[in-house]
C-alpha cells in the first residue's frame, strides 16, 4: 500500500459482488496528491481527469 493511502475496509466474501447492497461498506474518499497534481486541465503534461 502506498503511503497516504487509507486502510482497506474488510467485507465478507458474501458481500463482494457489486450488485449486492452492503450498507456497512463506506470507504473513505481518496485521491492521491500525485493524481491531483497531474490534472490534464492544469497543463500540457497532465494525464489525469479533473477532479
Image: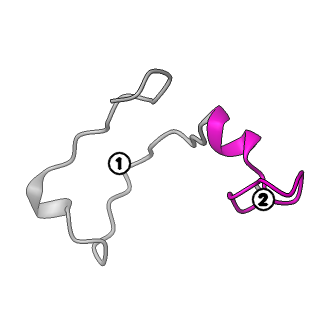
Q: Residue beneath label 1, please? A: 24
Q: CB of mark 1 within 8 Å of CB of mark 2? A: no
Q: How many marks?
A: 2
Residue at x 44% of width, y 21% of height = 3
Q: Which residues are magenta?
A: 33-50
Magenta portion: prevailing SS class: loop
**Which residue is most to the bottom?**
19
Whether 26 is drawn above or below 49: the answer is above
Q: Nearer the viewer, mark 1 or mark 2?
A: 2
Residue placed most toward the observer, 15 or 3: 3
Q: Along the horizontal axis of the image, is 11 left or right of 3?
A: left
Magenta run includes residue 51 = no
Sequence-wise first label, 1 or 2: 1
Q: Quadrant of the N terminus?
A: top left
Q: Which residue is labeled 2 in the image?
A: 50
As drawn, the residue found furthest toward the front would be 45
Please name the residue shown 20% across and 62% down the image: 16
**Image position of 18 with respect to 40: above or below:** below
Residue at the right extreme, as displayed: 42
In the displayed structure, would residue 7 be above or below residue 46? Answer: above
Amino acid at each position: 500500500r502506498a503511503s497516504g493511502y487509507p486502510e482497506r475496509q474488510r467485507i465478507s466474501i458474501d458481500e463482494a459482488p457489486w450488485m449486492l447492497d452492503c450498507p456497512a461498506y463506506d470507504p473513505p474518499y481518496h485521491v492521491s496528491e500525485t493524481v491531483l497534481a497531474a490534472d490534464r486541465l492544469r497543463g500540457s503534461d497532465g494525464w489525469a481527469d479533473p477532479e
